[in-house]
Image (spheres, grey):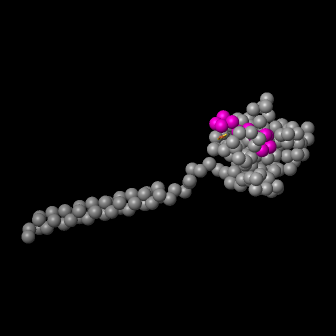
Amino acid sequence: MSETNDKGRRSFLAAVSTGWALFTAASVAGLGMCVRFLFPNDTFEPATKFKVGYPADFAASNEGVVDKRYKTRGIWIVRTLDGFFVLSTVCTHLGCTPNWLEAEKKFKCPCHGSGFYSSGINFEGPAPRPLERFKVSLAADGQLEIDKGKKYQQEKGQWDDPESFLKMEYSV
Ligand code: FES
């Protein structure tokens, strides 16, 4: 075999080896990305815990003033003269979102007409039970903190749980 042929064969083999090495590296990198895609760090679930401002930001009344600012996050904050509780915006009939009617002092569900008092207790329509409440507490910085990961159902006696109500007398 001539020296020229031998050189050509060696450079061909070197090119093939380099090609395989690059292909293997790209495959491993691609596989790694697929595995990362299957197990992402972030779940993109909205946080269940969030702050909603300072107690002084909320008006109060005896039966409770309903604050609608966080309805898009699935809650109403109700401030009574004794403290705070937080209601879920999910109707307990079939899951529609009721509206707070200030003039009538009630939540009214547009789907089948269920009505709830500002306390969350159901009193008209097909809803079989009161609205659910979420945990409310005071964060270290003095703001109200809601935890939608913890819910309380009146019919199970869970509204007696101290975490379902934040005691705080209203002072002007
Ligand atoms: S979903 Fe609210 S009354 Fe039916």
Q: Which residues are magenta?
A: 110-121
Residue 35 is at least partly visible in this image: yes
Q: Residue furthest right?
A: 171
Q: Is residue 153 above or below residue 71?
A: below
Q: Identify the residue at horizontal 64%, vertical 40% (top origin).
A: 96
Q: Is residue 38 above or below residue 52?
A: below
Q: Identify the residue at horizontal 43%, vertical 57% (top origin).
A: 33
Where residue 88 appears, as percent x and y from the top left, is 71, 45
Q: Does residue 117 show up magenta in the picture?
A: yes
Where residue 74 appears, as percent x and y from the top left, is 67, 43
- The one of 2 and 130 positioned closer to us in this rendering: 130
Where residue 21 appears, as percent x and y from the top left, is 31, 63
Where residue 68 appears, as percent x and y from the top left, is 73, 37
Q: Identify the residue at horizontal 79%, vertical 34% (top origin).
A: 105
Q: Residue furthest top?
A: 103
User: For this view, does 23 lie left or right of residue 152?
Assistant: left
Q: Does residue 24 show up magenta in the picture?
A: no
Which of the 4 image quarters holds residue 22?
bottom left
